[in-house]
Image (tube, rainbow, N blue to C red):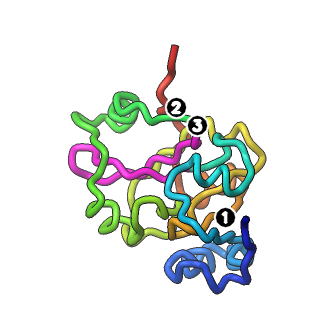
Amino acid sequence: MTTTNDGTDTHPRFAEALRGLGLGELTGRVRRFPEATRTAAEAAAAIGCELSQICKSLIFAADGVPVLVLMDGASRVDLDRVREELGAAEVTRARAETVRETTGYAIGGVPPFGHLTRTRVLADRSLLAHDLVWAAAGTPHTVFPMSPGELVTHAGADLVDVREHTG
């Protein structure tokens, strides 16, 4: 179901970001799927990994300013925790236009780094529960693997606890 490619299917902006970070070899590890994997569940099923091994890259607006939250695929973001972490009055989910203007990518394909503009990045600690996570590589059809520690470092993220706790 998955196809490993030679990097030719990698989104050009994301491939450039990888090279800029000294990670050009990762373009050969990007996997492309014939069907879009816009949701974490679709991506996990296509890869054959646990849902929590998917790294979602989500854009929110904190007092109108875009912020990126990296969250494991099995969890939901607690907006109150994000608001408290940022000291913001209000945090809302960003509109699709804002996501594209901020990152240069469409929802469902937003990678954890390589965006058009620099934003504050929060990474939930739950990502560190795995040796390897999978994140979007610039399109809803592509993902790449990386250790969560490296991903957090390359994204310039602050480690926080912003996932919704149930129960």
Callout in the foreground (2, 1): 1
**What residue is pinned by disc 1?**
144
The residue stretch that appears in magenta: 56-73
* Front residue (pair 3, 7): 3
Disc ID at residue 42: none
**What residue is pinned by disc 2?**
161
Q: Residue furthest bottom?
A: 8
Residue 82, horizontal then vertical, whole percent: 38, 35
When the figure is inspected, residue 166 is found, relative to residue 90, above or below; the finding is above
Q: Earlier in the sequence, mark 2 or mark 3?
A: 3
Tell me the amino acid under the disc marked 3.
Ala
Q: CA distance from mark 2 to mark 1?
A: 24 Å
Query: What secondary structure is marked by label 2?
Result: loop
Tell me the amino acid under the disc marked 1.
Phe
Q: Residue furthest right?
A: 131
- Point 53% across, 56% down: residue: 156
- Point 60% across, 52% down: residue: 152
Residue 72, horizontal then vertical, whole percent: 58, 42
Q: Earlier in the sequence, mark 1 or mark 3?
A: 3
User: What secondary structure predominates along the stretch shown in magenta?
Assistant: strand
- Point 62% across, 73% down: residue: 21
**What residue is pinned by disc 3?**
74
Q: Is residue 103 magenta?
A: no
- Left or right of 56 on screen, residue 44: right
Tell me the amino acid under the disc marked 2.
Asp
Query: What secondary structure is marked by label 3?
Result: loop
